Image (cartoon, coloured by chain):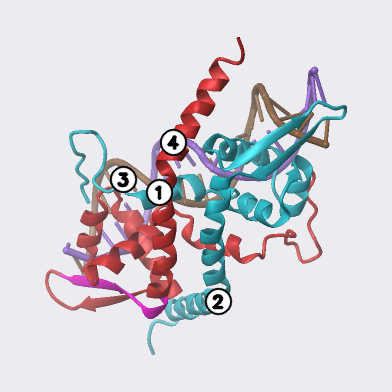
Chain colours: A cyan, B red, C brown, D purple
Amino acid sequence: MVMTKNTSGKYSAVDCPIRQVLDRFGDKWSMLVVELLSHKGRLRFSEIGHNIGDISQKMLTVTLRSLEADGLIAREIFPEIPPRVEYELTTLGMSLVPHIESMTLWGKEHLATILNNRKVYESKLKKPSY
Amino acid sequence: MVMTKNTSGKYSAVDCPIRQVLDRFGDKWSMLVVELLSHKGRLRFSEIGHNIGDISQKMLTVTLRSLEADGLIAREIFPEIPPRVEYELTTLGMSLVPHIESMTLWGKEHLATILNNRKVYESKLKKPSY
DNA sequence: CAGAATCCGGCATGATACTG
DNA sequence: CAGTATCATGCCGGATTCTG
């Protein structure tokens, strides 16, 4: 399939908002952090890490930074020893929560079906036809 | 941050549905294909490719296969020369559409703000304090 | 405690060639 | 036309080490 670029150097469907949303939140952790903060309110760095369970320090830092850069979360540093840093959702961040929840709800409702579909599909591949 | 695995070999928060949803639809193309089919109805392979614009033949195949395996789209082969294959959403696939749309809508509304936030954030990094 | 910096492997994605 | 097969690659994310 030969894809044609337009004169602006972009692709025809690159600009659509669904792509932009996926580019920002399709990563492994962002949505999860937003969801977590929406439930727990205000948390410090290590608390977020523990609540998520598996996430490397690096990725937690990277995720929090990009969310902060986007203005979805606010970061407050307390100049203490040992240092303490707390995070919470901004208004903008909170506005995203309902949409995450509705996606999650859909997942809850249909994931069992999907997994079963997938199993059936794979078993059909193994036994083509008799 | 040291993450502890439990006895089942999984991590503490791995099972939450939001993760599952992201694992399936956080990829680059799946949501886009579903969204496209929801608007255009029934399309053949090459039509999907052209509508998306940039997507390699390989990734289109992979994406369509996994969506089919999940039962989100239906694939119909017409035994003609040259071959023709058409795709359309299943009921399950259609049930996902509203959630994609609501996310997309959120993106449309707030993306300009986010991009601006990001620009402001980066300019602050360059000029720390005067 | 909250990170910054670095190294590194694997997998998602891309490019290319071939086929029924 | 609608794929499959193979090879190449970028970069995401994990592990580790170091600092204030």
Task: In the rendered view, tell whether residue B110 sits above or below residue B31.
Answer: above
* Residue at the right extreme, as displayed: A81
Residue B9 appears in the rendering: yes
* Label 3 close to label 1 by CB (< 8 Å): no
Residue furthest left as drawn:
B81
Is disc 3 on the same chain as disc 4?
no
Magenta highlight on residue B36: no
Q: Is residue A56 above or below residue A52?
A: above
Q: Position of residue A84 (x, y in %)?
A: 80, 34
* Location of residue A9 in the rendering, given as x and y in whole percent from the top left corner: 24, 34
Between A104 and B56, the one nearer to me in the picture: A104
Q: Nearer the viewer, mark 4 or mark 3?
A: 4
Q: Nearer the viewer, residue B42 or B85?
A: B42
* Residue type marked 3: Val
The main secondary structure of the magenta stretch is strand
Q: Residue furthest top?
A: B130
Indicate the chain on which mark 3 is placed.
A
Q: Label 2, label 4: how many angstroms apart (C-alpha)?
A: 34 Å
The residue pinned by badge 1 equals B109
Could you say which disc has been placed on residue B115 in the image?
4
Query: In terms of depth relative to the viewer, which is nearer, A113 or B127?
Result: B127
The residue at which mark 3 appears reads as A14
Question: Is the same chain shared between marks 4 and 1?
Answer: yes
Q: Position of residue B71 (x, y in %)?
A: 42, 76
- Whichever of labels 4 and 1 marks the residue nearer the N terminus, that label is 1
Task: Confirm whether circles 2 and 3 share one chain.
Answer: yes
B106 on left or right of B49 = right
Mark 4 or mark 1, whichever is nearer to me: 1
* Stretch in magenta: B83-92
Cα–Cα span, label 4 and label 1: 12 Å
Q: CA distance from mark 1 to mark 2?
A: 28 Å
